[in-house]
C-alpha cells in the first residue's frame, strides 16, 4: 500500500533554531515533493527530489532512497517560517501523488 | 503568483443542490488536479486531467464529476452536495507528470465549501 507518514505532527521552536521535519514512505518512489501551506491556506511547492539533496536559501531537503526517508531542514528559523509543511510521494507505477498529513511548525520570536 | 485562480473562494450550499467549482489557469499547463483537504487527512485526489477532454478518477471521486473543454479551465461538479463534501478544495496545475524533473506544481488558493 502506498503510504506517506510525517513527523512530528506539530513542532514549536524558538527563532533561530535548526528545524528538522521527517517524511517516510512505504515503497519505491520516483519523486518526493515538499510543499508549504501558509496560515492563509495557500500552498507553495518547495522542492522535488528523486535523489540526494537540494538547497534553497535556508531550506534544505534530503532524501535517502534505501531507507525510504526524506527530511526538510530549516536553518536559522524565523517566525515567517511558521506554516504547515507537507511531503508527498509519486510512487512507481502511479503518476498521482500521495500526501502526508503535514507538520504544523510554529516559530516563536 | 502563478496564473491559477479558483472560484468561488467560499460557498455555502444546501444538501442536494449541484455545485460547480472552477479552476482557471493562464500557464497552458497540461496537467490539472482537484484535491480536497480535510482535518486529519492529507490532500486527497478527486479527479485529474492530462489534456482537453482527458480526465481520470482519483481516490475519492464518488459524488464528483469534472470537465475540461479547454486547456485553461477545469470544472469540478458536485452533482448533489452532501454534508460529507464539506471541505476545502484545491486545484493544482503542472506542466508534466509528478516525477518529471525541473517542473513544479502550482496550487490555487482553495475554495472553502460548506454543505448545510
Image (cartoon, rainbow, N blue to C red):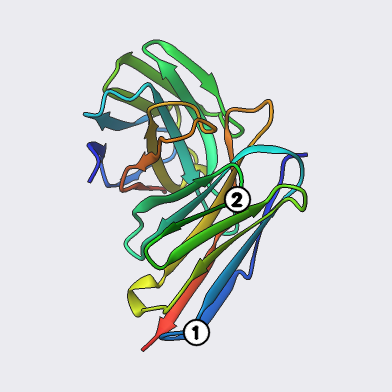
Residue B48 versus residue A54 in the image, above or below:
above
Q: Residue at x 58, y 28 (%)?
A: A95
- Estimate the x, y position of residue A17 in percent, counting from the top left: 48, 84
**Label 2, label 1: how many angstroms apart (C-alpha)?**
27 Å
- Estimate the x, y position of residue B94 in percent, counting from the top left: 39, 31
Chain to which the residue tagged by mark 2 belongs: A
- Determine if marks 2 and 1 fall on one subunit: yes
Residue A42 versus residue A59 in the image, above or below:
above
Contact between labelled residues 1 and 2, with CB atoms less than 8 Å apart: no
Which residue is denoted by mark 2 in the rendering?
A52
Crowd rating for badge 1 (residues with CA inside 10 Å; few <14, some 14–19, many 20+): some
Who is closer to the viewer here, B103 or B9? B103
Crowd rating for badge 2 (residues with CA inside 10 Å; few <14, some 14–19, many 20+): few
Which residue is denoted by mark 1 in the rendering?
A13
Q: Residue at x 45, y 58 (%)?
A: A55
Q: Is residue B82 left or right of residue B105?
A: right
Badge number at residue A81: none
Q: Is residue B99 left or right of residue B103?
A: right
Looking at the image, tell me whether mark 2 or mark 1 is earlier in sequence order: 1
Amino acid at each position: 500500500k502506498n503510504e506517506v507518514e510525517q513527523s512530528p505532527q506539530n513542532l514549536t521552536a524558538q527563532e533561530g533554531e535548526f528545524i528538522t521535519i521527517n517524511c517516510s514512505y512505504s515503497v519505491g518512489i520516483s519523486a518526493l515533493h515538499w510543499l508549504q501551506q501558509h496560515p492563509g491556506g495557500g500552498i507553495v511547492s518547495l522542492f522535488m527530489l528523486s535523489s540526494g539533496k537540494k538547497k534553497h536559501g535556508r531550506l534544505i531537503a534530503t532524501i535517502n532512497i534505501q531507507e525510504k526517508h526524506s527530511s526538510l531542514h530549516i536553518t536559522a528559523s524565523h517566525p515567517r517560517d511558521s506554516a504547515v509543511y507537507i511531503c508527498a510521494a509519486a510512487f512507481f507505477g502511479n503518476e498521482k501523488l500521495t500526501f502526508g498529513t503535514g507538520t504544523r511548525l510554529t516559530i516563536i520570536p | 503568483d502563478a496564473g491559477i485562480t479558483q472560484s468561488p473562494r467560499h460557498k455555502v450550499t444546501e444538501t442536494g443542490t449541484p455545485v460547480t467549482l472552477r479552476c482557471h489557469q493562464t500557464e497552458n499547463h497540461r496537467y490539472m488536479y482537484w484535491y480536497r483537504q480535510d482535518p486529519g487527512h492529507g490532500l486527497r485526489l478527486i479527479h485529474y486531467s492530462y489534456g482537453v477532454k482527458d480526465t481520470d478518477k482519483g481516490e475519492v471521486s464518488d459524488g464528483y464529476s469534472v470537465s475540461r473543454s479547454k486547456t485553461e479551465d477545469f470544472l469540478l461538479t458536485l452533482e448533489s452536495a452532501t454534508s460529507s463534501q464539506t471541505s476545502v478544495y484545491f486545484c493544482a496545475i503542472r506542466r508534466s507528470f509528478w516525477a518529471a524533473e525541473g517542473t513544479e506544481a502550482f496550487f490555487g488558493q482553495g475554495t472553502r465549501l460548506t454543505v448545510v
